[in-house]
Amino acid sequence: MFGDMTTIEVIKLFAPLIVIQLGLAIYCIVDIIRNGARNMNKIMWVSIVLFINMLGPILYLLFGKKRWQDDKN
């Protein structure tokens, strides 16, 4: 599939996904550190965000992010 493409061309092809994934991970980690998480501790959520690429930040945004200021830890 990528046999006739150079390494630079493959990197250019995947660059938007890499930027989105890094931006999403950084946003989620900063949010976890500042605001905490809703249903697990901070260390668990940071681990999920870092080690489960692309799916980890999405899981955090769906299930772990505090929605309101009065959410309990």
Image (cartoon, grey):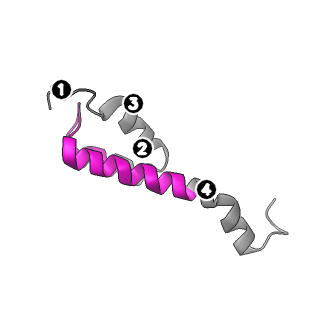
Q: Nearer the viewer, mark 1 or mark 2?
A: 1
Disc 2/disc 4 C-alpha distance (Å)? 18 Å
Classify the position of the N terminus by image quarter.
bottom right
Q: Earlier in the sequence, mark 2 or mark 4?
A: 4
The residue wearing badge 4 is: 16
* Number of residues whose C-alpha sits closer than 10 Å to that of mark 3, classed few (under 14), some (14–19) or many (20 or more): few
Q: Main secondary structure of the magenta part?
A: helix
- What residue is drawn where x is 44% and y is 49%? 24
Q: Residues within 10 Å of mark 4 (few under 14, many from 20)?
A: few
Name the residue at 20% across, 47% down.
34
Q: Earlier in the sequence, mark 1 or mark 4?
A: 4
Structural crowding at the residue carrying mark 1, measured as other residues with C-alpha within 10 Å and reported as few (<14), some (14–19) or many (≥20): few
Name the mark nearer the viewer: 2 or 4: 4
Q: Is residue 19 magenta?
A: yes
Which residue has dot 3 on it? 62
Q: Nearer the viewer, mark 3 or mark 4?
A: 4
Mark 4 residue type: Pro
Circle 2 Cα neighbour tier, 10 Å, few/some/many (<14 / 14–19 / ≥20)? many
19 versus 8 height, above or below: above
| Percent of width and height locating residue 57 | 41, 43
The extreme right residue here reads: 4
Q: Earlier in the sequence, mark 1 or mark 3?
A: 3
Query: Is residue 13 toward the left or the right of residue 23 in the image?
Result: right
Residue 16 at x, y = what percent? 61, 56
Q: What secondary structure is marked by label 1?
A: loop
Read off the magenta span: 18-47
Question: With 61 as the anchor, is 10 left or right in this view?
Answer: right
* Circle 2 residue: 56
Say which residue label 1 marks. 71
User: From mark 3 to mark 4, how far is it between C-alphas?
Assistant: 22 Å
Amino acid on which the number 3 mark rests in the picture: Leu
| Residue drawn at 52 percent across, 52 percent down | 20
